[in-house]
Image (cartoon, rainbow, N blue to C red):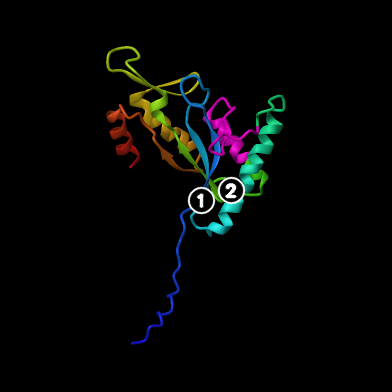
Amino acid sequence: DDPTPAPAADVRVRLPAPIFPGISSPGGLEAKVRMTNFQLVGKRDRPYKEALPQLIKVHRKVGELLKEKFPDDPAADRLLPDGSYECRFESADEVMGFLGEAVGACELSLGDDVTVLLTMGATRFFKENTGEVGSYMYCPEEGTEVEADSWPEWIQGLLGRHACVSGVVDPVSREDYETWMKLRKEMG
């Protein structure tokens, strides 16, 4: 018996797409944009070692552009504990437009090179019994109230305007099973 170990096989491991902090909301009904996180995601068809530096470059550019956009705010480019930047925008559409600007400034394409993972954290902006008994409301942005029955369509509209969103996490409240089922049926 030969005690020499057999040579290692040529093993290739495919790492998942890297995810990097982007813009986060403090959340709750007092925030303007109440969705939790807009995270930067590298494309799955790229090697990890290529996608990660691209995300780092975009992350740094987000900080630079925030400082330019909000020059009177000394904390505009301050990092939160999770490495993201605090949301200073009025709407999810503004956040997405700003991320597109940052990605473009890095000579990359939002949707082709970098996508966005949207963590909604919908339980944080869900209101029960807002009128009649049993009526529910989602308030994803200041001044926006969406009946629970219309919530799946609102999400689809957001995704339709921003095809660069590669995933949505926590899109409905834990207490709202009916809307969850409707969303699953309509979106698959």
Q: Give whichever of 78, 169 is nearer the camera.
A: 78
Q: Is residue 56 above or below residue 35?
A: below
- In reply to whether residue 90 is colored magenta, the answer given is yes
Answer left or right for 90 relative to 138: right
The image position of residue 43, as x and y in percent, is: 51, 52
Three-letter amino acid code at the position of disc 1: Pro
The image position of residue 143, as x and y in percent, is: 49, 18
Q: CA distance from mark 1 to mark 2?
A: 8 Å
Q: Do labels 1 and 2 touch, CB within 8 Å?
A: yes
Q: Which span of residues is magenta-colored?
A: 77-101
Q: For mark 1, what is the residue?
A: 18
- In reply to whether residue 186 is colored magenta, the answer given is no
- Label 2, residues with CA under 10 Å away: few <14, some 14-19, many ≥20: many
Q: Residue at x 52, y 45 (%)?
A: 115
Q: Is residue 53 above or below residue 102?
A: below
Q: Quadrant of the N terminus?
A: bottom left
Residue reaching furthest bottom?
1
Three-letter amino acid code at the position of disc 2: Leu
Q: Quadrant of the C terminus?
A: top left
Q: Residue at x 34, y 24 (%)?
A: 148
The image position of residue 145, as x and y in percent, is: 43, 20
Quadrant housing residue 66: top right
Q: Residue at x 38, y 83 (%)?
A: 3
The image position of residue 176, as x and y in percent, is: 30, 27
